[in-house]
Image (tube, rainbow, N blue to C red):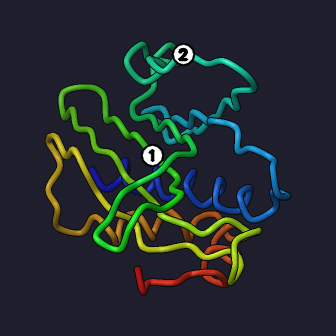
Amino acid sequence: MHELLRLAGYFAAHQIRNLRNLSDGEILFPMHGYEDADGHQGMICFVGEFDRDVLATNEQGAQRGVLLVDGYVTLEAGKFDALIVEAVEYGPDQASLTIAVPYHPPASPGGFAVHRPRFFKLSGVDRAGLSEAFFAGVDTHPEAAEVWNAHRDDSV
């Protein structure tokens, strides 16, 4: 389960770095990241239409996979832009969850900010250690972790 959260953190950091570099009006392309049983990773960036069932079909025969899309999340503090991460562990230890990483876009008043992740729709996942495993994954992407940490705002 922690490997799934680390994978999600790695690819979330990658997309947060991409978000930081977007100009006003540009869009973040959806991304599918995956990892096989030997730890080899791959990713597919989607331009235009894409199959939302990419995790269900698991065409790469992966051990775990994530789908990252730009969206929104409603929290007690209001509605936020958010990087939405759907994560799946395949095989006998099946698990899944959705992670929302709220953010303020670069063009917003106050500039780019990344807020703490929220974990939803847990199936076969224990809540203990979710944030730690997720941020361990963020830290495995040094350039992206630098962007994340420079714009981290845990006030939301």
Q: Residues within 10 Å of mark 1 (few under 14, many from 20)?
A: many
Amino acid type for the residue under numbered disc 2: Asp
Horizontal side of residue 152 vs 45, given as left or right:
left
Compared to residue 32, the image places residue 28 above or below, namely: below
Q: Position of residue 14 (x, y in %)?
A: 66, 56
Q: Which mark is residue 126?
A: none
Compared to residue 116, the image places residue 6 above or below, namely: above
Quadrant (top left/top right/bottom left/bottom right) for the C terminus: bottom left
Horizontal side of residue 145 vs 133, given as left or right:
right
What is the CA distance from the residue labelled 2 to the residue labelled 1? 15 Å
Q: Residue at x 85, y 58 (%)?
A: 23
Q: Position of residue 154 (x, y in %)?
A: 44, 84
Q: Earlier in the sequence, mark 2 or mark 1?
A: 2
Q: Position of residue 29 (x, y in %)?
A: 70, 38
Q: Secondary structure at mark 2?
A: loop
Q: Nearer the viewer, residue 140 or 57?
A: 57
Q: Residue at x 39, y 31 (%)?
A: 63
Q: Nearer the viewer, residue 96 or 18?
A: 18
> Where is residue 121, by image quadrant?
top left
Q: Are marks 2 and 1 in contact (CB under 8 Å)?
A: no
> Where is residue 127, by image quadrant?
bottom left
Instruction: Return the residue at label 2.
Output: 51
Q: Residue at x 55, y 40 (%)?
A: 69
Amino acid type for the residue under numbered disc 1: Val
Compared to residue 29, the image places residue 16 above or below, namely: below
Q: Secondary structure at mark 1?
A: strand
Q: Residue at x 67, y 84 (%)?
A: 150
Q: Residues within 10 Å of mark 2 (few under 14, many from 20)?
A: few
Residue lying at the far right in this picture: please name it.
23
> Where is residue 31, by image quadrant?
top right
Q: Which mark is residue 85?
A: 1
**Number of on-image labels:** 2
